[in-house]
Image (cartoon, grey):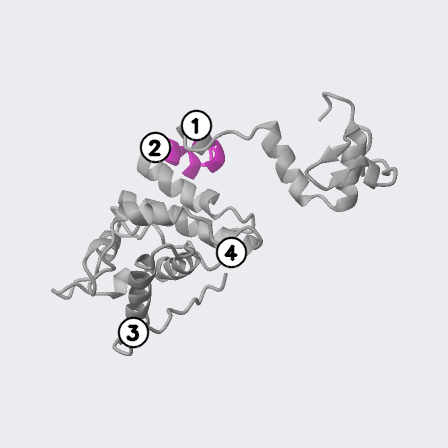
C-alpha cells in the first residue's frame, strides 16, 4: 500500500493536506455498505502522519486522537472510537495478496487501538514521545507490524511495566514478555507448520506431502498429481529429532 495515499477530492474548500484527509475520512465513514478498503487506506495515511496533531480545535489547540475521531465535523470526523475500532478490524480487499499492505494495516490497527486506549501520543515523564523512532511507512521486515518490538514494548509499558523493564534490561525478549502478559499466545506446532508451508516452494511442498504420505492438501494438491518427489532438502529426520 502506498504510504502517500491521497484524499479523494470532495471540496475545493480544504486548505491543507490534513484537512483533506479529515474530509475523506468523514465521507468514507458515511458511505453506507461500502467496501472498507478506501476508509482503511485513508485512515492508515492519517495515522502515519498523525494528522490530528496538525489540526486545531475552535480555540486553536491541537487535537487529540479521540477529539479527531469524535468531534463533529469540521473539527473532527464526527464518529466514535468504538465505531472506528470495529471498522479497522475489517479486511482490505487487497490485504491478503500484499504482504507490504498487510504489514502497514497491522501497524495501523495496533496503533489505533493504543491511541484509543490512551497510550498513543502520550508523553513520558522525561517529555519524550513514546512513538518516536517508529516509522509506519517502513514496517518490520517480518510483515508483523502489530507484533513488532516497538508496539509490544509500548503495550507492556502500559499494561505490565514490570515486564517492560525486563525487556529493556535484556533479561526477557519482547515476545516472551507478551506471552507472559497474556496478550500473545505461544505458537503451536500447527502455527509453525502453517508459516513453514507459506514459505515453502512448490517442490518443497510436494516433497513434504510425499514424506508424510498425504494424498491431498487443500482443493487442488494431491499426491497423484505430482511425480515421485525427491527427498526433502532437510534430509530424513526421525520423529522426535526436530
Given contact means CB atoms under 8 Å apart, are the residues at marks 2 and 4 in contact? Answer: no
Given contact means CB atoms under 8 Å apart, are the residues at marks 2 and 1 in contact? yes
**Left or right: 164 as drawn, with respect to 189:** left
Residue 173 in view here: no
**Residue that extends furthest to the front in the rendered view of this protein:** 33
Q: Which residue is under mark 2?
A: 160
- Which residue in the protein does label 1 denote? 180
User: Magenta stretch mostly in which secondary structure?
Assistant: helix
Residue 228: x and y in percent read 88, 37
* Vertical position of residue 232 compared to residue 122: above or below: above
Q: From the viewer's perspective, is the residue at label 3 or at label 2 nearer? A: 3
Question: Which structural element holds mark 4?
Answer: helix
The answer for how far apart the CA atoms under marks 3 and 2 are is 40 Å
Q: Residues within 10 Å of mark 3 (few under 14, many from 20)?
A: few
| Helix, strand or loop status at disc 3 | loop
Name the mark nearer the viewer: 2 or 4.
4
Of tags 1 and 3, which is closer to the observer?
3
User: Residue at position x 28%, y 69% from top?
Assistant: 19
Percent coordinates x, y for residue 233 in the rendering: 80, 39
Which of disc 4 and disc 2 is earlier in sequence?
Answer: 4
Would you name the residue on which mark 4 appears?
A: 101
Q: Which residues are magenta?
A: 160-177
Residue 128 visible within the image: yes
Q: Is residue 162 magenta?
A: yes
Q: Earlier in the sequence, mark 1 or mark 3?
A: 3
Calculate the distance from the C-alpha at mark 1 to the C-alpha at mark 3.
Answer: 45 Å
Amino acid at each position: 500500500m502506498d504510504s502517500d495515499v491521497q484524499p479523494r477530492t470532495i471540496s475545493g474548500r480544504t486548505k491543507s493536506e490534513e484537512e483533506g484527509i479529515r474530509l475523506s475520512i468523514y465521507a468514507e465513514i458515511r458511505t453506507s455498505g461500502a467496501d472498507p478498503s478506501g476508509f482503511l487506506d485513508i485512515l492508515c495515511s492519517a495515522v502515519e502522519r498523525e494528522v490530528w496533531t496538525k489540526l486545531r480545535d475552535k480555540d486553536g489547540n491541537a487535537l487529540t486522537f479521540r477529539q479527531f475521531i469524535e468531534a463533529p465535523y469540521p473539527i473532527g470526523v464526527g464518529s466514535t472510537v468504538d465505531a472506528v475500532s470495529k471498522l479497522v478490524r475489517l479486511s482490505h480487499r487487497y490485504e491478503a495478496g500484499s504482504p507490504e499492505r498487510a504489514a502497514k494495516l497491522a501497524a495501523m490497527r495496533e496503533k489505533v487501538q493504543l491511541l484509543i486506549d490512551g497510550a498513543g501520543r502520550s508523553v513520558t515523564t522525561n517529555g519524550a514521545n513514546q512513538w518516536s523512532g517508529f516509522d509506519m511507512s517502513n514496517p518490520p521486515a517480518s510483515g508483523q507490524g502489530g507484533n513488532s518490538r516497538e508496539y509490544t514494548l509500548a503495550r507492556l509499558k502500559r499494561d505490565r511495566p514490570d515486564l517492560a523493564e525486563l525487556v529493556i534490561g535484556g533479561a526477557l525478549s519482547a515476545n516472551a514478555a507478551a506471552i507472559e502478559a497474556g496478550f500473545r499466545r505461544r505458537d503451536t506446532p500447527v502455527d509453525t507448520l502453517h508459516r513453514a508451508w507459506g514459505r515453502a516452494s512448490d517442490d518443497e511442498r510436494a516433497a513434504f506431502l510425499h514424506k508424510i504420505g498425504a494424498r491431498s492438501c487443500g482443493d487442488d494438491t494431491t499426491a497423484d498429481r505430482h511425480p515421485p518427489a525427491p527427498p526433502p532438502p532437510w534430509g530424513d529426520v526421525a520423529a522426535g529429532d526436530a
